[in-house]
Image (cartoon, rainbow, N blue to C red):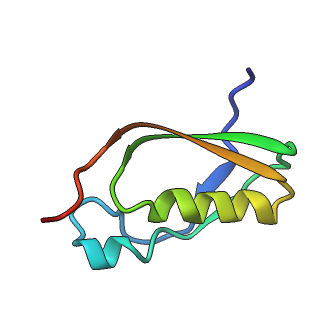
Amino acid sequence: IPARRALGRAAGRAQTGLDRSARLVGPRVQAVRPVPATVLLVDDVVTTGASLGASAAALRAAGAVRVLGLVVAATPPPG
């Protein structure tokens, strides 16, 4: 499976250290190259899912028909 960086982040603050409500906004990302119809999106840790959602939306806007997510770890939900 070829691995290519397909997304870039717009200038802005890193999500590290932000509280949950700020993280839910998610980063602004955009495709930096043409993308295939099916993309496997890999993330190390999912906290709120906002980054995955923003990334998937950017990939779909760039032409991906199907975006699959693979996450290595997840933080426990609050409470």
Residue extending furthest toward the front: 79
State the residue at coordinates (60%, 58%). Answer: 55
Q: Is residue 51 left or right of residue 68?
A: left
Q: Is residue 34 left or right of residue 55?
A: right
Residue 71 place in picture, x, y as percent: 46, 39
Q: Nearer the viewer, residue 52 or 15?
A: 52
Q: Is residue 11 left or right of residue 22?
A: right
- At x 48%, y 68%, the residue is 27
Which corner quadrant holds the N terminus? top right
Task: Indicate the quadrant containing the C terminus: top left, top right, bottom left or bottom right.
Answer: bottom left
Horizontal arrangement in the rendering, residue 34 relative to residue 67 (left or right): right
Q: Position of residue 75 (x, y in %)?
A: 26, 49
Residue 63 vertical placement versus 54 (above, below): above
Of residues 33 and 76, which is closer to you in this image?
Answer: 76
Q: Whole-percent x and y of residue 40?
A: 67, 38
Q: How many marks?
A: 0
Query: In the rendering, at what x and y percent does residue 39 appear?
Result: 74, 41
Residue shown at 82% from the left, 47% from the top: 35
Question: In the image, is residue 3 above or below residue 12?
Answer: above
Q: Residue furthest top?
A: 1
